[in-house]
Image (tube, rainbow, N blue to C red):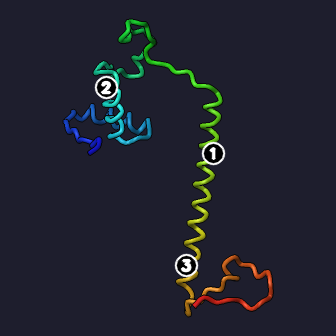
Amino acid sequence: MGNKNKTISFRVNEDAFEALQSIAEERDISLSAVFRDYVDQLVEHDGQVEVVPETELEARTVKDDDGEDISFPPTVEVPKRFIREHERLELEAEHLREQLDEYKGYVNDLQDRLEDEEEEILLLDELDGENEDDDEPYQLR
């Protein structure tokens, strides 16, 4: 049928729990996401994952499956164009969020105006606050 998620439950002592919570807060993710990331790494590396505090982390080389030396922690070089594109997309997403907030505010304002109308008549010319032409206003009933 498909790939179903399974739930894993286990207990940790209070100190470990607080340490995990602080890791999650530092990364601005949920505690569940910390465990999912760890499990994903564990599966990806066939159970050969070492959890080391950042203070004890030092650059070193380890052997991969083919016996070649690789640096730990792994480093990846990202092209500048990728970083620029990522930044552009972040700015665009922020702009779209702002527009969405504006539209939500506009809709809320229209709903408030509609609720405030005694006769429930909403003049289209009054919606934008402009009366450009002096024709007779239309009314929705």
Indicate the quadrant where residue 29 lies. top left
Q: Secondary structure at mark 3?
A: helix
Between disc 3 and disc 1, whose residue precedes? 1
Image point 43% across, 7% down: which residue?
Answer: 69
Identify the residue under disc 2.
42
Residues packed near mark 2 inside 10 Å, few (<14), some (14 to 19) or many (20 plus): some
Between disc 2 and disc 1, whose residue precedes? 2
Question: In the figure, is residue 135 to the left or right of 51?
Answer: right
Question: In the figure, is residue 127 to the left or right of 48?
Answer: right
Amino acid of disc 2: Leu
Image point 61% across, 63% down: which residue?
Answer: 102
- How far apart marks 3 and 1 lie (CA) works out to 31 Å
Residues packed near mark 3 inside 10 Å, few (<14), some (14 to 19) or many (20 plus): few
Q: At which x and y percent is residue 130? A: 75, 79
Between disc 3 and disc 2, whose residue precedes? 2
Q: Closer to us: mark 3 or mark 1? A: 1
Q: Secondary structure at mark 1?
A: helix
Mark 2 and mark 1 in contact? Answer it, CB < 8 Å.
Answer: no
Amino acid of disc 3: Asp
Indicate the quadrant where residue 48 lies. top left
Residue 65, compared with residue 21, is above or below; it is above
Identify the residue under disc 3.
112
Q: Nearer the viewer, residue 57 or 75?
A: 75
Identify the residue under disc 1.
91
| Residue that lies at the very extreme toward the right in this rendered image | 133
Image point 41% across, 39% down: which residue?
Answer: 25
Amino acid of disc 1: Leu
Mark 3 and mark 1 in contact? Answer it, CB < 8 Å.
Answer: no
Q: At which x and y percent is residue 121? A: 59, 89
